[in-house]
Image (cartoon, helix red, strand yellow):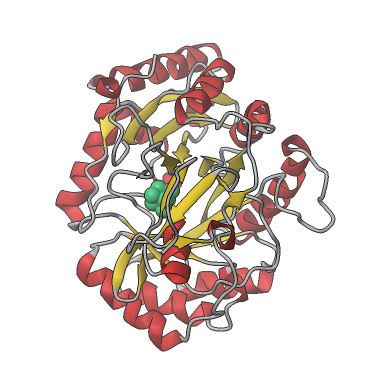
Amino acid sequence: MLEKRNVYRLPWSMNDNPIAWIEVTDICDIHCEGCYRQHLTGHKPLEQLKEEVQFFLRWRNPDNFSIAGGEPLLHPHIVDLVAHIAAQGVKPVILTNGRALTPPLLRELKKAGLAGFTMHIDSHQNRPQWRGKNEKELNELRQMYAEMVAAEGGLYLVFNATVYPSTFHEIPDVLSWGCRNIEKVQGLVFITYRTATLADTVATDAYDRRVDLGRLSYTRQQFDEHFVTSPEVYQIIKEHLPEYEASGYLGGSIRHDSYKWLIGALVGSRHGIYGSVGKRTMELAQTAHHLWTGRYLAYLSTAKIGSKIFWLSGWDATLRQAWKRWFKDVLRRPWRALDRVYLQSIGIIQAPDLLPDGRADMCDSCPDITIYDGKFVNSCRMDEYRLFGGFLSVVKGKQKASG
Ligand code: SF4
């Protein structure tokens, strides 16, 4: 059973966080149902982006830059930005839907110093040629990108998918595909869908003036379904893959019982999954990386770790189970001792929850903070700043005079 005391609370904070989320454009070439960004301003100039890089280096202490959007591959200076970030000694990672990715661009980005991709693919994206496909069918598209990135080599690849009530039961299909491709896929992330409903809702800005909530992209007239939670995603993964265990978490900014980020790492080879790393290994990884480099850790090139991870199984009970399964397997088939062992991270993110009093339960120590107007702002709610100058208060059925 998922209990906070059994999972390591990641030590990340506002000013010491491994992730810097830099948005290069708000233009995109598809429309995802769960997207929280709309086209208002277009591509940012390269000089502005370089200033933002310096701001993050000064105030965030990042280990990697998540280059996001919009669709960052559409930015005309994406290769220059990657090269600029890599030159600062920090890992550039591109968050993309993949549509603009070609083998020549991939080669150019790698040469510029790219560390890897987080690729967003799910069945609510309105992708031309892939409309109406379910998550299992979309594994064909995931496979195509996995082969393309693996063919170039030396880059890590994480796939993320937004989880809707209607696609929740399809999580095992994506998970099974990921496990079969553990040599090529370094991580999977499941992000639970959230929306604010307009019916019977009053939204006010920081000056208590009533505003039109419908101008935000993350609103719907009505949503009567049950929002999927992180513990539910954890549970369905666990039922499908008992070897899975979570090892790190971030809680909610308001609710004590939220799991906003839940991170785990599977240990396996091309023959199957042996188990997971436990909370002690996660704690050691964060602490040792911070001692060694001065920064916490978000992405790891797992190919370099291989079977060495088992050296830690002596002090990590969860990892010990993985080692035992690996050892039994090797006793039966000794040649498998030569097979490479990989790590594959499994992330679960529960997007902000609107509480009845108008506040939102956000991710405690939000890793996806970005810059708006010289200040850090949670990227998932930045459009409230861009459209209304600050966060909104949203209350159901509230009677209030408009300002
Ligand atoms: S609060 Fe931060 S980490 Fe959480 S969903 Fe929003 S942007 Fe992402």
Residue 341, percent across and down? 47, 33
Left or right: 11 with respect to 230? left
Residue 115, percent across and down? 45, 62
User: 138 and 287: which one is in front?
Assistant: 138
Q: Is residue 91 above or below residue 288?
A: below
Residue 26, percent across and down? 56, 71
Residue found at x 26% / y 54%: 17
Q: Quadrant of residue 364?
A: top left
User: 13 and 172: which one is in front?
Assistant: 13
Residue found at x 53% / y 67%: 69
Left or right: 24 with respect to 367? right
Residue 187, percent across and down? 51, 42
Count of labels shown?
Answer: 0
Q: Is residue 363 above or below residue 319?
A: below
Residue found at x 69% / y 32%: 166
Left or right: 177 with respect to 110? right
Is any atom of residue 4 visible in this view?
A: yes
User: 150 and 75: which one is in front?
Assistant: 75
Is any atom of residue 301 visible in this view?
A: no
